[in-house]
Structure formats: structure tokens, C-alpha cells
Amino acid sequence: MPKVTTLNVNGTVHNIDSDESVPLLSVLRDELDLTGSKYGCGEGQCGACTVLVEGVARRSCLLPVGSVGHKQVTTIEGLAKGEQLHPLQSAFLEEEAMQCAYCTSGMIMSAVALLHANPDPSEADIARFMQGNVCRCGTHPRIAAAIRRVAQVSRGAQP
Amino acid sequence: MKNAPAKAAMPFEPERYELNAAPAYHFAASRREFFKLLGSGLLVVSVSPQASVAQESGSSKRPKAHELPSDIGAWLHIGEDGKVTVFTGKAEMGQNIRTSLTQAVAEELHVPIVSIEMVMGDTQLTPFDMGTFGSRTTPIMNLQLRKVAAAALTNLLEMAAAQWQVNRESLEAAEGKITHKENKRSIAYPELLKGRQLTQTVRVVETLTPPARWTAAGRSAPKIDGRDFVTGKHRYPSDQKLPGMLHGKILRQATFNATLASADTSLAEKMPGVTVVRDGDFLGVAAGDTASAGRAIAAIKAEWKSSPQLSNADFFQSLQKAAGEKQPGSEASYETGSVEKALAGAEQRLLQSYTVAYIAHAPLEPRAALAQWSGDNLTVWTGSQRPFGVRTELAEAFRIPESQVRVILPDTGSAYGGKHTGEAAIEAARLARAAKRPVKLVWTREEEFSWAYFRPGGLVQIASGMSKDGKLTAWDFHNYNSGEAGIRSYYNIPNQRCVFHEVESPLRQGSYRGLAATANHFAREVHMDELARVANMDALEFRLKNLDNERLRAVFTAGAEKFGWGKAKADGERGFGMGGGFEKLGNVATFVEVAVDRESNTVRIVRMVTAFECGAIVNPGGLRNQIEGANIMGLGGALFEAVQFENGRILNGRFSKYRLPRFTDVPPIETVMLDRKDLPPAGAGEAPIVGVAPAIGNAIFDATRVRLRSLPLLPNNMQLPSPSAA
């Protein structure tokens, strides 16, 4: 089986040794020790494994690592700039948008992609876009509030 | 593995927390070891109220002088560096108790929250704890830790008083310092403790700060380690790693209760780096990575012997049959007056049955464990609500003493009552023993759906009687299989009988958030709505007429006010309903508005209001989060969650087939929190779920005159059943 030997994650090109059919999630978690992306269902139904590939939200549990090529992968570990949290990370803390928080990294990565595509989403836009991410603890209203908080701040910054 | 799965495969598993049987307690740490581990300072231990009962019954011997008492509930250490370390066997799975327990200690000890570290759920480091369930952390552990912290502060005050030769009453504590009220001289706790090794056991009730004067508790505090969660840094059980670790995978039985007839493992055994374990009906592999483990499992040819088993429909028929026969042998959970006489003489009577489906906990993190052997000593990192229970299971499975087993619970990706057992821990440990390397095993979602356990399905039958003017006189309540929690009515009914009937369950079943209280409240609160209609009374007025409990009246009244109950009337498209009750020391009333789209014949939840009261509030933000979460989780079981099964197999055991509440399912939810500073705080993880399903069902009836008596109410994509089917 053809092998994949490099992967560009969070701005660094990593040397890896994986069959091209192995899901990106396994490579991230097991080979690169980036365990922030979670396994939840293995069929792209819960969003816990969400990462960005060239800024677009992808379910890494279904994505063969061979299909990533030289594209840039961003995981939850690559979101903060040093000690400076990404605005969505801060907003999740401020809104207390988590209980067990197992879904949190996937939620934040999906939300980053949402705001990238639509900087000013309505409540309905947020619900539709985030529909594929499961929070079993039921913090949905807080997650939506965290996303709106960031959208409002950036709207305020760029009138 | 021969002895352990016997318990795991039991077809009927009662709600485990009600068994409440503590294994023998082994506590080996001595004072000296403690100070070696933590450094000099002050160590305060508390005797747990439950453990002291065991002590009185003579089950444990008196401690020797150098040992600590053997019945400790929690302990706290203040180091000479000022660091406060608190030890409790409780587990954090999203209820946010790591934060609320820290707040409690900060409150009593007068130290900043950041100086406190909580060590939780580690069988080697923390005192025995029955488990984290039943909403008992706040009423019991919170109280114990507050007592321990208060005792520590008393000690510190006495030390300072002795050192300065002043009266203790002239001193006050704040921010980790003791200050003389008049001359303002002050000393930090660490300075008092320099070079000392002091211990104290707390057996008496200390004077605690009354809730009305709380400063650290009673306020919202953000999740203590929240930053680790939003950055992906926190390591859940499934994220644990060890050098040289292998990945495990289990070959699952073809059906429940199947036995292994034959297995050809030769191909798998030839694969490089693969260890195959066959032990009785246990068949699993360990390999260098998950893909190799998967390939090895796929290469095993196994034949299973199965026997025919009940499907969904058969099961509910068997419940109906059991209800028809009434099983006179079952003992009533509660009985008062004469139900037969009161029913016979009632001016109005109603007999109805209600059912609830089996549902899955579906914690987003499936069961996971990492096991490591060192000789005959076993360490397992896993996600569970019962670290000491899992330790017992492991000791039994491998026939080793519990003292050779250490179970560590990293903060876990939720449980909701679904992680009382240690299946993954046993499996990983079995593979690790054979492979002579650490093994990690993470269950797949499909495994979690099929091989964990379920919230029991069941049937409730109620026969009731009331006077013409709507005063309840008789109540005969029978629950088949779903359980006893919340079975007793809180309405005033002079003649009442509540009976739980055990029925053989086709699925492995166990506890779930709120346990059977969801089923029992659903039946009771829908029945109350039906009775109100018979009496031609408003649903709130009817409840209040039959309800004396002042705390429950308060939540119904407060919720109704927030909701605007009675302001708008049902008009065929909109409807309003309520449901509430009392469970695990919490009082709840939920109000729901629904809208019906007549074209598609579907229902939409427009809004929800939940009023809740659980005594004094420790962390209002955390409480609101728990109430909202319970409401949203409740939507799933109320509207569409149901496990489908047939002949020993789960038919819809994946997220693409089992519908969970998602963003577009969640309506605006308002919460009303009643803070009773005059009452001790109680837990809130469970009770707020119980009003959701009946409130929705009653609102649907209000809008449509279609009475739905089965959970889930709208499994067919929120579509109302055709009138004939309902």
C-alpha cells in the first residue's frame, strides 16, 4: 500500500509513516500525539474529530491521510498564538460553553470554519452549520452564544 | 476471564447504585508516607458518614497509632509552600465538580481558588468512594470537604493564637493569611506550618459558613482547567499513552449472550507484532496500531452459538401481559390507605398505561482504558463513575488482591449514569497481560451502543380516582421494569400504592441520568394532565389543588410566572404544557410551548422554561449549565431516542441511525433558579431532566388533542402519528 511520508500540520511539516488509507484522525492522534481531535463515531456524524484543511472544516475520522497531500491541516492545538487564545477559544471559556468538553475542540474548529465562511451568521445559520457537531451534555445554546460573541466583536472592530 | 464476564453478561442488571454494597475497604497509607508524598504541613482527614456506619457495625478494626483511620471520606493537605491539595474519590465527567468542590474548600479555608489542587478518582491516592452518581457529590462530598477545610482553618487559627499568645477570637483569616484584627499583624499559612507534620481527624460537625455569608461558594466560577479543554491539551482516558503501548481490539459476540463455538485465529497469529488472546468467550488482539489490530480481528474466523431473543415489539407485549396479570407477589415501594376501597368509591376514575423505550447514554467519549502490568500489579487509566468498583471488578477478573490494582480516572468525556462498569478496563488488562506490554483499548461507537448498558424500557400503569371537584382520592401506580426511582407521588393522595415489578429484560440495563424517575414522572405528569382535563380544570390549578409540598409549589408557581402560563390559549396550532416533580433532593417544573405545522403534520418545540430549586446554590453558572443540559438531553429521550433491537442485536447502534438532540432541535430555554439559602445544597445533574417529556407530551395534546403516552413521543421525524394510531 502506498505510504504517506509528510504531513503539514499547524504550520509544521511532520515526517510520518502511514498507509494512505489510514484516517487523518489516527495519524494526528497516534503518530503525531495531537490528541485534541477526538474520536466520537468514525462515520462523520458527530464532528468531534473536526479539523481544518486549508481553512475548511473536515471530519478527520473519514478523511484518508493520502488525500491531504501538501494541504495545510489545522487542529485545535494550532489555534492559539502562543499564550494568546483564538477569540473562539476565549469565547467558549467566557460563555462556559462546555461540560465534559469532549466535543469542544471539534465545536471550536467547526465554528472557526463557519466564521471564516460567514463572519456574521444568524442564529439559524449557526444552528444549520453546527448541526453535524454533537454535544451530548446539551451546551448548544452556550456554544451558539460563543460564536455570536465573536461575530459581534469582529463586526464591531470592522464597521 | 472466566469469572468476570459472568457478572457483565447478566441479562438483568439492576440499577447498580441502589445495590449500594461497599466492598471491604483497604487503606494502607500511613501518616509518614503521606508527608513523604506531600511534604510537611497540615493534614486533615474526614470520616465519611457512610463509612462510620460500617465502623459501628464492627466491620473494621481500630487503627494503630501510626495509621490513619480506615474510614476516611476525604482529606486535605496544606503544604509549607502554601499549596492546598484535596483528595476525593469522586470523578469529573462534565458535572463540573472539580470546580464546585474547589470553591467549597476555598470558601471554608479562606484561600484563593488557584492555590487548590483537587486529586480525584485515583484508587491509590484518594479515599474510598462508592462512586459518582445519584446526585450525591454536592450534598455529601461538598459538605465533607467544607468540614475538612473548616477544621484546617481552626487549626491554623489556634497555631497563630498560640504563637502570638493572643485570643483566637481576635484573629481573622482571609486570602491564605491570618491577621490580628486590632494590631493588623499577619502571618501566611505556610509560615505557620514550616517544618511541622500535623494531622487531624474530623469527626464532629464544625461550624460552617452559612450559605447566606458565602463569598467563594454561591458565586459562578469558571471551569477551573477550562483552558486545557479549549486548547485540546487535556488528556481524556482515550488520550492516555505509555511508551511501548499497543492498541487492542475485541472480537464481539455475534449476538448478546452468544458463546464461542469455534474460532480459527491462525491467520491473525501469523501477523507480525500481533498478540491474539482467546480465553473462554473472550477473543481479542493487541497490535502496534489500530489499523493492524483491526486487520487481525478481521482475519479471525469465529462461530458463535446464539439462542433466539426478544425484539422491541415482543418486549413491550410481554410488559403489557405482565401488567394484565398484575403480579400480586411484588412488594409495594409505598402504600398508604386503602386503594381498592378508594378507587371503588371514587366519583371519577381513570386508568391509563404509558411506556418508555430503551435509550442509550451515548457519552461522546466511548469506553476507553489503558492497562499496564508490572509483575502482578495492575494500573488502569479509564473513564468510569466508580473507580473503586472498577478496581473490584479487575481484582475479581484476575484473581488478585485489590491492593495490587490501581485505577486512575482522568477527567472523562461524560457518562450520564452509563459508565458504572469497567468492561474496557478488564479487556485492556487481559490483552496487556498476554502481550506483556501496555495496551490501550478504545471502544468504537458501535461497541458503545451494543456492549455498554441501556436505560431500561418499561411500562407504567396508573389507576386513579378523584372527587367531582378534582381532589385526588386514589392512586394505584405500577411500574414494570424501568425502576423505582421517583415512583412515589408527591401529590396528596390519601390512598396510594406504588409498585415496581421486575420483568426479565432482553437488554443489559442500568442507571441513567435520573434513572427511572424520567419514566415515572412522565407517566405521573401526563396522567395528571389527563385528570385535569377530566376535572375540567387548568393544569396548574389542578396540581396546586392536590399539592401541599411548599418547595414543589414554589417551582411550579415560579416557572408558570416566567412562562406566562395561561396568558395564551391553545389554538390548534400552538399548545402549552407542564410537567414537574421532585427527585434527588431537587424540585423542578418545566413548561413547554409547541407549534404544529398542519401541512407537514410536524411538531416544533417553540420554547421551554424550567424552574429549579435544590437548596442553597453553590455555583449559579454551573447550576444553570446543568439545568440547560438536562433539558436538552431530556429532549432526545422525550422526542426521538429509542434503541431498536431484535434477536440479540442492536439495529440502530450508530449516530447515523440513532437520533440525538442537535443544534436545530434546541429551542430557547429559560431557567429560573430558586436559591434557598436556608437549606443545604443538593445535586442538580439529574432532577431537571424529569419534567421535559411530560411537559412536551401535554403541550402536544393541548395543541392537537392527540394524547401521546409512549416515549419517544415523535420518533418519526417529529411527525404526529395519524389519529387512528395515537
Image: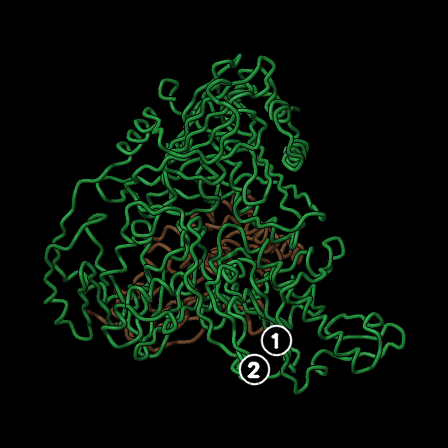
Chain colours: A brown, B green
- The residue at the point 59 percent across, 23 percent down is B539
In which quarter of the view is residue B387 placed? bottom left
Q: Residue A147 location, x and y as percent?
A: 56, 53
In which quarter of the view is residue B447 placed? bottom left
- Label 2 resides on the chain identified as B
For residue B47, above or below residue B466: below
Q: Residue A61 location, x and y as percent?
A: 34, 59
Q: CA distance from mark 2 to mark 1?
A: 8 Å
Evaluate if marks 2 and 1 touch, with contact meaning CB atoms under 8 Å apart. Answer: yes
Q: Nearer the viewer, residue B219 or B127?
A: B127
Mark 2 or 1 closer to N-term? 2
- The residue at the point 46 percent across, 63 percent down is B59
Q: Residues within 10 Å of mark 2 (few under 14, many from 20)?
A: some
- Disc number for residue B35: 2
Q: Which residue is mark 1?
A: B43
What amino acid is labelled 1 in the image?
A: Leu
For residue B371, above or below residue A126: below
Mark 2: which secondary structure?
Answer: helix
> How many callouts does the rendering have?
2
Q: Quadrant of the C terminus of chain A?
A: bottom right
Q: Is residue B158 left or right of residue B614?
A: right
| Residue A72 seen by the camera | no
Mark 1: which secondary structure?
Answer: strand
Q: Nearer the viewer, residue B192 or A56?
A: B192
- Label 1 resides on the chain identified as B
- The residue at the point 53 percent across, 63 percent down is B230
- Disc number for residue B501: none
**Residue furthest out toward the bottom:** B195
